[in-house]
């Protein structure tokens, strides 16, 4: 009975000069070409994720031109809640009088 493979095979075409560079690096690092391409793809994915995060950071900064911190936001919320509580207390005192 044949067991399923833990990996898949891809065919990749490279220009001759790049193919020679790949072979040279593989030899210098005592790695297989497959190992080089696996590592290259991992690095590529990390780079893409970092670029995506940088885009999200830029968008977030556009919505926060004052550069408020998380502590600032929490302080604003606390201040607003305190103001609302004072207003409600003042309204309740007016009604009670």
Image: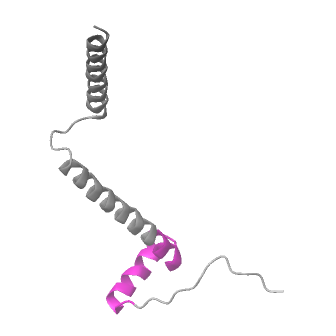
Q: Is residue 67 visible?
A: yes
Q: Residue at x 29, y 56 (%)?
A: 56
Tell me where residue 20 appears, x and y as whole percent: 38, 86
Q: Nearer the viewer, residue 81 or 96?
A: 96
Query: Does 31 appear in magenta?
Result: yes
Q: Is residue 6 above or below residue 72?
A: below
**Based on the displayed image, in which of its 4 quarters is residue 88 positioned?**
top left
Q: How many numbered badges does the structure rendering display? A: 0
Q: Residue furthest top?
A: 97
Relative to 9, does residue 94 appear above or below in the rendering?
A: above
Provide the residue span drawn in magenta: 14-39
Quarter placement of the N terminus: bottom right
Say which residue appears at 30% left-offset and 61% top-offset.
51
Q: Which residue is pictured at 26% across the width and 26% down the height?
A: 80
Q: Main secondary structure of the magenta part?
A: helix
Q: Nearer the viewer, residue 25 or 94?
A: 94
x 26%, y 28%: residue = 76
Image quarter of residue 13: bottom left
Q: Quadrant location of residue 55?
A: bottom left
Does the magenta portion include 75?
no
């Amino acid at each position: 009975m044949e067991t399923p493979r833990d990996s898949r095979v891809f065919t990749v075409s490279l220009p001759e000069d790049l193919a020679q560079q790949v072979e040279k690096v593989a030899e210098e690092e005592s790695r297989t070409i497959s190992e080089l391409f696996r590592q290259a793809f991992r690095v590529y994915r990390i780079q893409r994720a970092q670029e995506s995060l940088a885009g999200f950071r830029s968008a977030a900064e556009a919505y926060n031109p004052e550069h408020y911190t998380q502590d600032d936001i929490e302080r604003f919320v606390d201040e607003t809640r305190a103001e609302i509580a004072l207003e409600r207390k003042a309204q309740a005192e007016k009604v009670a009088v």
